[in-house]
Amino acid sequence: MDRPMRRKDKEITEQKEIEKILKKEKICRVAFNGSPFPYVVPLCYGYEDGAIYFHGFGGGKKIDCIRDDPHVCFEIDCDIEVVSDEDPCEWTLKYRSVIGYGKAIILETPEEKRKGLDIIVKQYAGKTLHFPEKALSAVCVVKIEIQSIKGRKNGYN
C-alpha cells in the first residue's frame, strides 16, 4: 500500500500542506473494489480529524462496493495549471495532489450521520446547517478512516 515516492523532489512532506489541500478542495475521487472492475467516482466531501466524509443514496454501487470490501483509495487535486513550451515534449502541469488509502464505514446512528453531514457542509458553506430528522433517516453517510496518505506537487516550491 505505502511505497516510497520515486520522485522525492515532488513529494509534499509537510502534513500541514496535505491538510490544507484536504480542507480546501471540493471534489474527492474515491476508488472502490468493484467486481469485475474497480469503480471510481467523484464525490463532494468533507475532511476533519484524519477522516473523509461523503454522503449519498442509501443504496447503489458505492454502498454495494463498501459492503463487499470497505478498502478504498482516494485522490484530490488542486492548483492545476498547464505550462506550455515551444517543444511539445516539454509541456507539463503545475499541480498539488494527495492520494490516500483507508477504510470506508457506513455511519448508522443519527448522531454519527449528523456529525458527518456537518463536516461536509462546513467544507462548502463554512458553517453547519440544520438537517431535518426525515432527511437524516433517508441519507447514507460514509466515513473514510484514512490509513495512509501522501502528497505530491509539481511546479510549486
Image (cartoon, grey):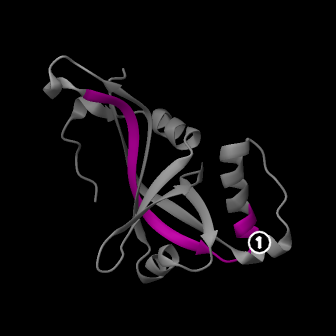
Residue at numbered disc 1: 136
Residue lying furthest top in this view? 86
Q: Is residue 89 left or right of residue 130?
A: left
Q: Is residue 50 above or below residue 114?
A: above
Residue plotted at (76% across, 69% down): 111
Residue plotted at (40% across, 78% down): 69
Viewer-nearest residue: 122 or 18: 122
Task: Write down the quadrant of residue 1 in the picture.
Answer: bottom left
Q: Is residue 103 left or right of residue 125?
A: left
Q: Quadrant of the C terminus?
A: top left
The stretch drawn in magenta includes residue 105 = yes
Residue 39, x across and y down, in percent: 38, 69
Viewer-nearest residue: 82 or 13: 82
Q: Which residues are magenta?
A: 92-114
Q: Is residue 152 above or below residue 71?
A: above
Q: Main secondary structure of the magenta part?
A: strand
Residue plotted at (78% across, 71% down): 135
Mark 1 neighbour density, 10 Å: few (under 14) some (14–19) many (20 or more): some
Type of the residue with mark 1: Leu
Residue plotted at (53% across, 78% down): 60
Q: Secondary structure at mark 1?
A: helix
Q: Is residue 144 above or below residue 15?
A: below
Residue 108, x across and y down, in percent: 67, 77
Task: Write down the quadrant of residue 92 in the picture.
Answer: top left
Task: Write down the quadrant of residue 72 in the picture.
Answer: bottom left
